[in-house]
Image: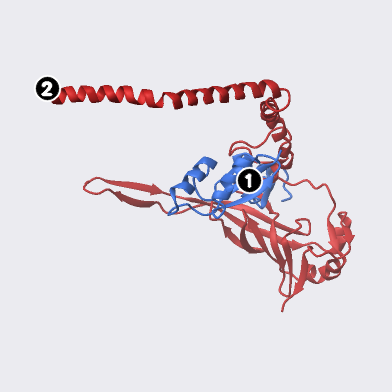
Amino acid sequence: MAFFRITLLRSAIGLPRRSTDVLKALGLKKRMATVFHAVSPSVAGQIMKVKELVQVEECQYRLTKQEVHLERKPDPGYYLEKSSSEQRGDTSL
Amino acid sequence: MFSRSALRSFASELRWTAPSTISSAPLQQRACLHQTASLMDSQQPQSQSSFTHPESPLSATPRAQDAKPKGIPPSNNFNEATMTPQTRADVPIAKQPVEPTFTSPLKVTKSMLSQLPHLAGQKPHYVVAQLHARPYLLTEGDHLRLPFLMPKVKAGDILRFNRASAVGSRDFTMKGTPTIDERIYECRVRVTGVDSEPLRIKEKTKRRQRHVKHATSKHRYTLMRVMDVRVKTPEELLAEGAVIVEDGEDASVIEPRS
């Protein structure tokens, strides 16, 4: 089952009330917010109303909020090779 | 007075009677139309119930039920086989500071293997290590004060930095795309302690009030010392089980200084 992944890139401030209401109906409250909706004609029509403001991709699964966050999370870039307690055991180091 | 009231009553009578007489026919028509429409509605589903009507609810309900089991498979991408990450605490093992386990051997291109002795033989080396996607240019013997307090490390711990965008020497630089494979180099760092900044006091005032609130902050930073930055020689790489492959486009390349 396919889903629309909709991200609000531009704010609807200063736009007609209609576009603000459409964003509210889609569940987009602030910029860079991401929502998932099942592909359907009604959702497609809603996206068409605000197509200048949002970025739309099609994906196979509905991701959780944390999964969307983890896509942007970088690697820590380090790991603990030897703790100080381990080193006390061997005197070579 | 009397005449007006009489007129009013007469007029009201007229109003009451006239619309009913005039609009009785269309109202009935409307009622009839409505009835027919409702009849049509009620008849259609009965006649076509087996074809059209139950399709939408029946197909909709299994979808809603299937959505949960179907939603689980992407969790395989996050190394947590059973559950999808729901809260901020659910971080897959790949994004935690844990020693990596390798499934495939290191792949080295022929051109890089031929140039690697030049880089490996020329000490000292520098590394552009990426900690939380922020670059740190490090050389052996450097003192490093991180702009944050590294969690779960103590003084004396030895860390390995395993994300580097570049490793180089005086004349050569190996650039990653975007990072170099961590098995080509070694960057070891010893935690030396925790630094603490002087207590900062910020006065918080509100309008028309004499009271002044003092907000304090005292951040702590991890101190480190770079133990060694080393690039492995081709012999070491081959001894560790590196595989030589043909030159590809997205492999890291050693560039001489221009």
Q: In this view, which residue lies farthest toward the bottom?
A: B258
- Left-right relation of B178 to B248: left
Give the answer, above or below, for where B243 lies relative to A17.
below
Q: In which quarter of the image is the N terminus of chain B?
A: top left
- Left-right relation of B16 to B134: left
Give the answer, above or below, for where B44 lies relative to B91.
above
Image x and y of residue B47, in percent = 70, 22
Report the disc number at residue A5.
1
- Amino acid tagged 1: Arg
To which residue does mark 2 refer? B2
Residue name at image x 66 percent, y 53 percent: A77
Q: The blue chain is which one?
A: A
- Amino acid tagged 2: Phe
Q: Colour of chain B?
A: red
Report the disc number at residue B235.
none
- Left-right relation of A13 to A26: left
